[in-house]
Amino acid sequence: MYVVAIAELKGSIEDEAPSLAEDLGATAYDARLLLAAGAPIVAKTTPDREAALELLARLRARGHGAVACDTSAVVSSADMVAMRRPVFGDDAVTLAGSGGEPGTRAAGVTGAEVERLPYDDVLALVPAVHRRRVDTTTQVRETQLSVGRAVASGGVMFTKSVKKDTHATSEERSGVLYVFRRSAATPWLLREHGTSWMGTGLPLAPSESENFRAAVGELRRRATGAVYDERLVARKVTEKMALSGAGGTTTVKTSTDAAVDLLAHVVAMWAAKGNAYR
């Protein structure tokens, strides 16, 4: 699949909506809704490469900062190098334990190697938020006293079986930092939660959120040539849904990870062209 996105919109939403609607074969109202989400905007996803390139050319002709890519080139956050135990050195970030600890190495890195990310190889720092929600519905049977049955049966049947649904919801919001590389090597990912903050070389703060912000700030300070683009922090994205059920329980899981991953790659592509924020 090919994605065409607007990384920077030229002009107003009202000016662009009619033209984009014509490009997409949609109504002006639908085009306004798409644009109102704010850049970066995924304008179209299509299996037709020529159609994608044609739309890209039209958007650029109208002065928009548009990019396109094959979705197979988008690395999911789950496949990025996890910065579980980052150590901030003088000229690079390394991962404590990457010489042998499971789960800290990227594909192709042997146990004898230490993973290292030079600050001058950092192209873009893109903070964002991953949101996840789990809704669980469980059907249970309860036995209740039935006065009506007792009367009708002459006192033989006093109870009845009743089906009842119980609902439970859990939500999680976690800050992340995408670290894209100039060398086009696998991006690194720093997570607010699940990261060991001891031994980073930074003062240890009381909370995960404070340590996360400090680490982001340190990367910004040291990777002086990197673009820093925080537009995705407040960006609302469509959640991907997964449905499962067994034993009278239905679970609906929604996650924004995949949508945010794609938008982060759009930002990085725009940064690679030298047109993004610093």
Image (cartoon, helix red, strand yellow):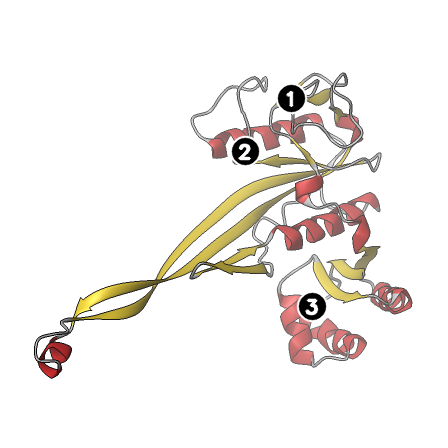
Please provide percent x and percent y for residue 202: 56, 20
Please provide percent x and percent y for residue 95: 67, 22
Q: Which residue is mark 2?
A: 213
Mark carried by residue 268: none
SS class, disc 1: loop
Compared with 219, 173 (above or below) is: below
Decide which of tag 1 and tag 3 comes sooner along the chain.
Answer: 3
Compared with 158, 204 (above or below) is: above
Question: Would you say 219 lies left or right of 269 here?
Answer: left
SS class, disc 3: loop
Q: Are marks 1 and 2 in contact (CB under 8 Å)?
A: no
Label 1 or label 2, whichever lies nearer to me, is 1
Question: Would you say 178 lies left or right of 171 here?
Answer: right
Q: Which residue is mark 1?
A: 101
Counting other residues with Cα less than 10 Å from the Cα at mark 1, is it few (<14), some (14-19), or many (20 or more)? few
**Residue in front for this viewpoint, 254 or 91:** 254
Q: CA distance from mark 1 to mark 2?
A: 25 Å
Which residue sits at x=66%, y=27%? 104
Please provide percent x and percent y for residue 220: 66, 31
SS class, disc 2: helix
Disc 2 marks a residue whose amino acid type is Arg
Please provide percent x and percent y for residue 122: 76, 33
**Residue in front for this viewpoint, 246 or 99:** 246
Asked whether residue 83 appears in the rendered view, the answer is yes
Disc 3 marks a residue whose amino acid type is Ser
Disc 1 marks a residue whose amino acid type is Glu
Which residue sits at x=87%, y=69%? 51
